[in-house]
Image (tube, coloured by chain):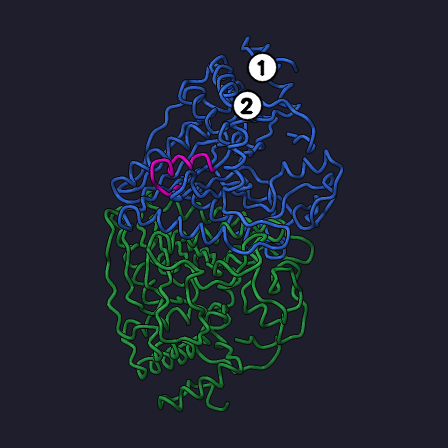
Chain colours: A green, B blue
Amino acid sequence: MNLPPPGLSLPHVPAAGLADFSVSVLAAVGVCAASRKAATAAMLHGSRLGIDSHGIRLLPHYVEAFSGGRLNKAPTLHLTNGFGAVATLDAGDAHGAHATYEGMEHAVRLAERYGIGAVAIRRSSHFGPAGAFAVKASERGCIGIVMGNSDSFVRLHEGAERFHGTNPIAMAAPSGGRHPWLLDMATSAVPFNRVQLYRSLGRDLPAGVASDEAGRDTKDPDLAEMLAPLGGAFGFKGAALAGMAEILSAGLSGARFSPEIPPMGGPDYTTPRNLGAFVLAIRPDAFLPQGDFEAGMARYLAALRASRPAIGASVLAPGDREWAEADSRAARGIPIDRDTQIAFHALSQTYGIALPAGLTAG
Amino acid sequence: MNLPPPGLSLPHVPAAGLADFSVSVLAAVGVCAASRKAATAAMLHGSRLGIDSHGIRLLPHYVEAFSGGRLNKAPTLHLTNGFGAVATLDAGDAHGAHATYEGMEHAVRLAERYGIGAVAIRRSSHFGPAGAFAVKASERGCIGIVMGNSDSFVRLHEGAERFHGTNPIAMAAPSGGRHPWLLDMATSAVPFNRVQLYRSLGRDLPAGVASDEAGRDTKDPDLAEMLAPLGGAFGFKGAALAGMAEILSAGLSGARFSPEIPPMGGPDYTTPRNLGAFVLAIRPDAFLPQGDFEAGMARYLAALRASRPAIGASVLAPGDREWAEADSRAARGIPIDRDTQIAFHALSQTYGIALPAGLTAG
C-alpha cells in the first residue's frame, strides 16, 4: 500500500502492457471474461489518471479476493426490483468494477429512454476508482454520478470510532472539450493511503485529518487509527456527505451499511462483503436543446480557469490535473512502485504469465 | 443580517403568527397567492429548524425584491424541455421558493410514475433554505435532493477572487422515524452570516474559512472579502461540490452561472437574476420492497447514534439538531433578532398589517 517517496526513480510501464498482464493473470485465476475486463479497465483508469491508490497496484489484492472466494469468478448479475427509469442490480458478489460498469450501462440505457436512469447495486465489492464509471457515462454523452460505501474507516463528526467507509462521490460531465469535467473524491478528509505515505516518509500529517484510537486528532501517522470526515471543524458536512453516499448505495439497494462490512484487508478473503453502490446517468439533451449544455460548460469552464489565482498558485477545474497526468503517462508510461513490482513478479511466476515490458529487469 | 449575540434575550414569536404576517405583507405588496404561500413556507422551514440565516428575517429582503421588480409578483411557470422522467422548468422570475416547490412537486409526480424524477429550473431566484424542498419530497415518501447556485461569494481552491456562490446541497430521506434524515449544507466552509456574526462579536474567525481581498486566508472578520470552499487544505473537494451544484442547477437548466448573477444584496433590485436550481425525487419502493428502505434507515441510524463519541462530545445524524430545535421552537416560539424586529415594524406601518403577537411591545 506504500506510495513511493517523491523523486524515487521507478520503472514506467505502458498502460497496454499492464492491461494485458492484468487480464492474463485474472484469466489464469479463472475469472470470467467480463469480470477481468471490467476490473482491468477500472484499475487502468486509476493508473492512467495518476490515482495510483486505486490503480494497477490493486491487482494482487483482487487476485487474493478471487482466489479466496470473496469475489465470484463467474457471477450472475441480475436486475431485481425497479420500474420506469430505475432498477436494482443484484451483482452476485461480482468484482465491484464489473457490477458498477454493468449498472452504469443500464443507467445510460434508461437515460436514453427517460432522460435519467438510476441503478442501485447490492452484493457488490470494492470497485476501484469511482470516477471510472462516471466517465463511462460521459463518454455516452451523459452526466454520470457514482457513489459507493465500504468498510468502516472514518469517524463521525465528534465521533471516536470508525463508522462510515471512505464513501466516494464521483461525477463526470461532458465539458465541450476533449475530456469531461471530473470529480472523484472520498468523503473523508484524506484517503488512507495518504496516511501510509506520511508514515513511510516519517512526516507529520496535516492537522484534523486523522484521529488516534480514542478519536483524538493526531498529526502522528503512526498513531492514526481512523480518518476524519471532510471539513475539519465543519466535519458534520463531510459526515453527512458520507451518509448521502451510504443511503443511496446501501439504503436503496439493500446492501450492507459500512459498519456491517468485513474489512477490505482481510484476514477473511472467503466471505463476500455485500457492498453497495449507486449510479445515475442524466442526458443533458433531455433538458436543453442539443449542444446547449456543452456550450454552457465551455463558457463556465473558461470563466473558472480564468478566475484569479492566489500568488504562486493556480486554479484548476475538477479533473484538469488528472487529465494532464493521463497525457503525461500516455507518453511516459505508468510508474510502478516497489511493492507492486515485487507482487507482479510473484504473480508472473505463480501463473506463468510474462511480465509487461518495462518490468522484466526488476 | 446580524445574528444576535448568544444569550441576548429576544422575543419569541409563534410560527403561525409569523406566517400570517408574512403572507399578509406579501399580499399587500401584490404578490400572488402561490408565491406568497411558497416564500412563507420556505422561510418558516428555516425559522422552525433554527436556520435563522434563511428564516423569516428574509421577508424584508423579499419585499424589496418584489417591489423593485427583480421578482415577478404573478409569475407564469411553465415546463419547457423534458421527456420521460425529467423536465426543465422556466420559472418566469418567480420567487425561488415558488419555483423550487413547484419543481419538486413535478419531480415527485415523475418519481411516482418512473421511480425517479428530475427537474432543472431556470429563471429562478433566491429560494431560502434548500432543505425545505427536500423535506417536501420526503413527506411524500421520496428521497429528495436539491441543489442551487447563487451570486459569486466563494473563491476557488487556490483562487483569489469570488467565483461560485455558496451553492447548497440538500437531501432528505424518510428515516423510519418521525423526521427525515436531513442534510442542508453550503459548499463553502461556513455561511457568510457566520462572518457577520463574528464581526458583531469582535471575535477571530476559525482558520481557513475566509480570505481577504487578495485571496489570502484571514481570521479577521472585518477583512473577510470572500469565503473559502469547504475542506480547508483540501478545498478542491468543496470547490468541486460547488461545481456539481453549479452544473446540475445552471448547466442543465440554461440559467446563469454564479459569476454571471447580479449580487443578492443589490443595489439593483429591478433586474431579474436568473438563478438555477435542480431537484431530484427518488422513490425507494421502486428499488426495494415496500418498507425495506425505512427499516434499513432505522437500522443505520440506530448504529450511527450509538457510535462512540469523543470525550465531552455527542454524535448526531444529519438533521437531529435541527429537528430538536424545531420541537423546542414549537413550544417556545421563534426568536426574532433586533434588525428583523425593526424591519417588521416598518413593514407593519407601511402596509397597515398588524404585527404578530409577541412583537407588539418592541
Side (left or right) of A266 relative to B352: left
Residue B109 % position (x, y) = 29, 36
Side (left or right) of B93 relative to B59: left
* B178 inside magenta stretch: no
**Residue A234 visible to an observer of this rendering:** yes
Residue B205 % position (x, y) = 70, 44
The three-letter code of the residue at mark 1 reads Leu
The residue that disc 2 covers is: B59
Mark 1 nearby-residue class (10 Å; few <14, some 14–19, many ≥20): many
Query: Which residue is at a point 28% across and 55% down the rendered structure image?
Result: A88
Q: Front-most of A353 and A90?
A: A90
Segment colored magenta: B131-144
Side (left or right) of B173 relative to B345: left
Q: Front-most of B319 and A316?
A: B319
Residue A134 % position (x, y) = 39, 58
B292, above or below A135, in the image: above
Tell me the number on the disc at residue A362: none
Q: Front-most of B199 and A93?
A: A93
* B141 inside magenta stretch: yes
The three-letter code of the residue at mark 2 reads Leu
Secondary structure category for the residue under label 1: helix
Q: Are marks 2 and 1 in contact (CB under 8 Å)?
A: yes
The residue that disc 1 covers is: B347
Q: Chain of mark 1?
A: B
Side (left or right) of B104 relative to B199: left
**Residue A307 visible to an observer of this rendering:** no
Mark 2 nearby-residue class (10 Å; few <14, some 14–19, many ≥20): many
Residue B221 % position (x, y) = 72, 40
- The residue lying furthest to the top in this view is B352
B266, above or below B342, in the image: below
Query: Which residue is at a point 43% across and 54% down the rendered structure image?
Result: A245
Q: Chain of mark 2?
A: B
